[in-house]
Image: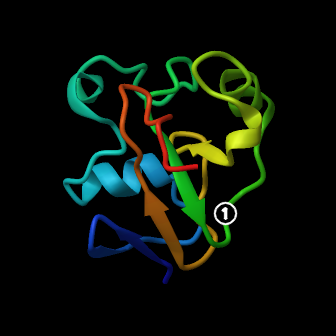
Amino acid sequence: MPTIEYEGERIDCEAGDELREALLEADRSPHNGASNYANCGGRAVCGTCAVEVRGPVSEMGEDERSRLSKWPHDLESGLRLACQTRVEGDIEVEKHGGFWGQKGDR
């Protein structure tokens, strides 16, 4: 059973679980501030669930690649959309600041 480390907590999930859903089920959000309420609900449209992920996860699909290639994101940032990312093993997740989570210390 994979473990997600997020905001100082360990969250257990099943291999193949969608990261966004696993976080929400654990009462944790991959969104910041108002984006907790103003988001696309996991359809890779808004980009507000962008997070930094370290560890084994699914490959990036076309919908995710398309959204992350548009402002304010950048494909080179290394961020992933939690709504499009499947957990494949133990991972560490970090949410950066900003409405879309795009402002990291890079």
Against 4, residue 36 (above or below) is above
Crowd band around label 1 with a 10 angstrom C-alpha radius: few (<14), some (14–19), many (20+)? many
Q: Position of residue 18 (x, y in %)?
A: 52, 52
Q: How many marks?
A: 1
Q: Residue at x 60, y 41 (%)?
A: 84
Q: Is residue 22 left or right of residue 77?
A: left
Q: Residue at x 62, y 16 (%)?
A: 71
Q: Residue at x 29, y 35 (%)?
A: 32
Q: Residue at x 36, y 44 (%)?
A: 30
Residue 26 lies in what quarter of the image?
Answer: bottom left
Residue 99 lies in what quarter of the image?
Answer: top left
Q: Is residue 33 left or right of residue 63?
A: left
Q: Is residue 26 left or right of residue 21?
A: left
Which color mode does the image show?
Answer: rainbow
Against 18, residue 90 (above or below) is below
Q: Which residue is mark 1?
A: 57
Q: Is residue 10 left or right of residue 3?
A: left
Q: Position of residue 13 (x, y in %)?
A: 42, 71
Q: Position of residue 100 (x, y in %)?
A: 44, 28
Q: Position of residue 85 (x, y in %)?
A: 60, 50
Q: Residue furthest front?
A: 106
Q: Residue furthest bottom?
A: 1
Mark 1 lies on a secondary structure that is loop
The residue type indicated by label 1 comes to Val
